[in-house]
Image (spheres, rainbow, N blue to C red):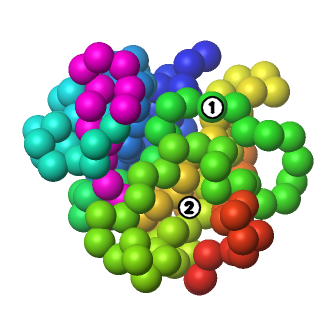
Amino acid sequence: MGFGRALRRDLGGDSTVVIATTAAGAIPYESGLRTVDMLGLTDPWVARHGDPYVGTPGHRRITTLDYLIQRRVTLVIGHPKWPRAGNGPVCSTDLVLPRYAAGEAAGRAFPPGMTAVEIPVGGDRHMLAWYLTPHPRIEEAIRTKGWRQRDVIDCRTNILPRR
């Protein structure tokens, strides 16, 4: 089973859940969820105002964390990745998390209380996503669908974000 199908299975295409991903093809299509394309190919704001990004041709900008917060993104998938084994905190570098456009000088690395979730995909496979904006559908999935919530640690400082 793919990431998008796992999201549809557990969230039912809930139109109030918003995801952000760099893989803005199959995951949005299969999940049925509203999506912010983190690389701006299908998001005009990111294409015009995102941070400069050195990527492959056609990927010259990347969203900012402020924009994802403004859009009330629920889950930041970034580029899909399998989580590291273990039960402890997730390292801040395990997924793409764009910088804040404003407030970076003040050391804003994470929104207060941000965690990660491991989403069962099938068998022993899990998808990792940043849980950015609290949402009742995600809380239900954590309680009833086997999603596992994990703290996020800033691996540069070994400090958990403020809650």
11 within the magenta span: no
| Dot 2 or dot 1, earlier in sequence | 1
56 within the magenta span: yes
Asked whether residue 72 appears in the rendered view, the answer is no
Quick check: 78 left or right of 18? Answer: right
Q: Which residues are drawn in magenta?
A: 54-66
Q: Amino acid at mark 1?
A: Lys
Q: Which disc number belongs to residue 81? A: 1
Query: What residue is shown with label 2?
Result: 139
Q: Quadrant of residue 74?
A: bottom left
User: Which label sits in the foreground, 2 or 1?
Assistant: 1
Position of residue 35 measured from the top left corner of the image (x, y, whole percent) = 30, 39
Q: Amino acid at mark 2?
A: Glu
Q: Are marks 2 and 1 in contact (CB under 8 Å)?
A: no
Q: Height in image: 19 above or below 58?
A: below
Q: Nearer the viewer, residue 112 or 133?
A: 112
Q: Nearer the viewer, residue 47 or 20?
A: 47
Q: Residue at x 40, y 77 (%)?
A: 105
Position of residue 97 measured from the top left corner of the image (x, y, whole percent) = 49, 51
Position of residue 144 measured from the top left corner of the image (x, y, whole percent) = 66, 51
Quick check: 128 left or right of 135? Answer: right
Quick check: 95 left or right of 64? Answer: right
Q: Main secondary structure of the magenta part?
A: loop
Q: Residue at x 47, y 26 (%)?
A: 4
Q: Quadrant of the N terminus?
A: top right
Q: Height in image: 152 above or below 124?
A: below
Quick check: 87 left or right of 127? Answer: right
Q: Nearer the viewer, residue 64 or 51?
A: 51
Position of residue 33 measured from the top left corner of the image (x, y, whole percent) = 33, 37
